Amino acid sequence: MKTEINMGRIRHEKWGPRIIDIDMLFYSNEIIEDEDLIIPHPGIAQREFVLRSLIELCPEFTHPILNKKMKTLYSEVKKD
């Protein structure tokens, strides 16, 4: 969040336009559920554009909660 602020992001509305948006998708195999941070990102399995990038970077990486590889999640998600 600090990087977003340093780059000029001002939070007005939840899904509003923004200069930059940084999401932490994974942190190794860690599972973190904090007030300000949830890892793995809860929307990964529903976002085709995220999974498309992840299968290029790490197709064999296994989601620590869903216990599925990125390539499997991508094959299951509705394509845009």
Image: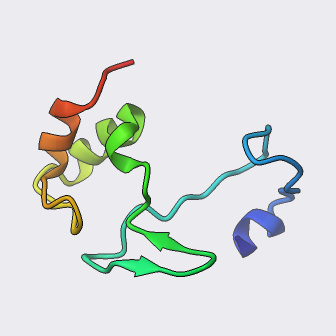
Residue in front for this viewpoint, 76 or 20? 76
Find residue 11 and report its horizontal and vertical position in percent.
85, 56
Compared with residue 61, is residue 2 higher up or lower down, i.e. above or below?
Answer: below
**Residue sitting at x 25%, y 76%:** 29
Q: How many marks?
A: 0
Residue in front for this viewpoint, 38 or 48? 38
Find residue 45 and report its horizontal and vertical position in percent.
32, 45
Q: Determine whether, in the image, residue 60 is placed left or right of residue 53.
A: left
Q: Determine whether, in the image, residue 35 is placed left or right of residue 3.
A: left
Compared with residue 12, is residue 31 higher up or lower down, i.e. above or below?
Answer: below
User: Which of the 4 image quarters holds residue 47?
Assistant: top left
Compared with residue 11, is residue 65 higher up or lower down, i.e. above or below?
Answer: below
**Residue sitting at x 30%, y 36%:** 52
User: Which of the 4 image quarters holds residue 1?
Assistant: bottom right
**Residue sitting at x 43%, y 57%:** 42
Find residue 63 and report its horizontal and vertical position in percent.
22, 61
Find residue 25 and report its horizontal and vertical position in percent.
42, 61
**Residue sitting at x 78%, y 44%:** 18
The quarter in which the C terminus is drawn is top left
Residue in front for this viewpoint, 2 or 72? 72
